[in-house]
Amino acid sequence: MNWRNILSRYARILDGEEEARYLTAKSIEVEFSKSDDIQTLWKIHDKSLKEPRIVDSPEKSLLDLKIEIADRIFRKCEFCERRCRVDRTEQRGACGVKEASIASEFLHIGEEYMLIPSYTIFFSGCTFHCVFCQNWDISQNICGIYIEPQRLAEMIKARRAQGALNVNWVGGDPTPNLPYILKVLKFCDENIPQIWNSNMYCSLETMKLLDGIIDLYLTDFKYGNDRCAERLSLVKKYMEIVERNHRIAYSQTDMLIRHLVMPNHIRCCTEPILKWISKNTPQALVNIMAQYRPEYKAYKYDDISRPLKMSEHGDALEIAKELGLNFIY
Ligand code: SF4
């Protein structure tokens, strides 16, 4: 398995043979006005993605239009399928996020081998409330600082010079922070791949705004049924939403799907997820992760209150092998 054949866009950007998609979005000319209603803005957006007019330094670009739409959603928040509809300039929704709050940012060397060193930007807050969260200190508490978008763009440039292969937007979850991310990219001009590292509980609107911006989806596919999702992450309609978004992401660009194998969840979660991938996104790269440890409130749940056994991870790998998936581990 040669990862370059699977993550081909990502590889071409790394090799300097292709432009990161957000840079192209900055060259797509669009015409819109602040007084246009949201339906009109979406029409212009969708048409510009389908039939892009590329020019040097347009007065208004597709990225500007995405920022305008994202700013409007921010005032009645529907970035994820919880659809709280709160005005985020004044209130927090279920994710706990108002303005973007960055818990940490650094060159990460613990990601998949083709991604490192990865300039990883950890936002605090999350659209999920997983009882076993391995990052609960930042996902379930709002902490960190607001960094001006222009300043973060300068930091991206500096990290690029230090060897960063990509910009890895994560958390918690990056979803509540989409307007902020788009504004950072407005100040950025590095040809560096953009990674959306997410639980994929995004709304359809978010998936559309990510189209033409994100080069690689690094997804976290956790559950194979709604019952486990509701019990352990406190979310509804998990399967419908996360499967839909995986299909959309797969149609947009490269995808690397992570699945953290959990104790006692091979038959109910791991197996159905891997089968779904083999049918629906067969060319995606898959990382079957073994590093589960009982964190946060996991000790209260008998099934997940212990680390994963080697044999359970082995069973997951066997299933992936039988299905012919492109997997790393
Ligand atoms: S991003 Fe946060 S505020 Fe917005 S809909 Fe989702 S949970 Fe609610």
Image (cartoon, rainbow, N blue to C red):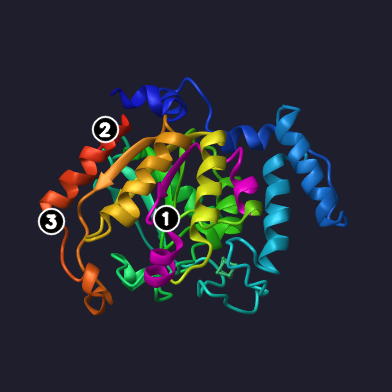
Q: Which residue carries the number 1 mark?
A: 170
Q: Is mark 3 within 8 Å of ligand 1?
A: no
Is 208 within the magenta? yes
Mark 2 is surrounded, within 10 Å at the Cα level, by few (under 14), some (14 to 19) or many (20 or more) other residues, namely: few
Find out whether residue 6 is within the magenta segment.
no
Q: How many marks?
A: 3
Q: Secondary structure at mark 2?
A: helix
User: Which one is nearer the viewer's eye here, 249 or 190?
Assistant: 249
266 vs 243, nearest the viewer: 266
Q: Residue furthest right?
A: 35
In this view, the mark in front (2 or 3)? 2
Which range of residues does the magenta coloring cover?
206-233
Expressed as whole percent of the image width and height from the top left, the position of residue 324 reads 31, 29
* Callout 1 amino acid: Val
Mark 1 is surrounded, within 10 Å at the Cα level, by few (under 14), some (14 to 19) or many (20 or more) other residues, namely many
Question: In the rendering, which numbered label is found on residue 322?
Answer: 2
Task: Tell me the quarter of the image containing the C terminus.
Answer: top left
Image quadrant where residue 138 sits: bottom left
The residue singled out by tag 3 in the image is 309
Q: Secondary structure at mark 3?
A: loop
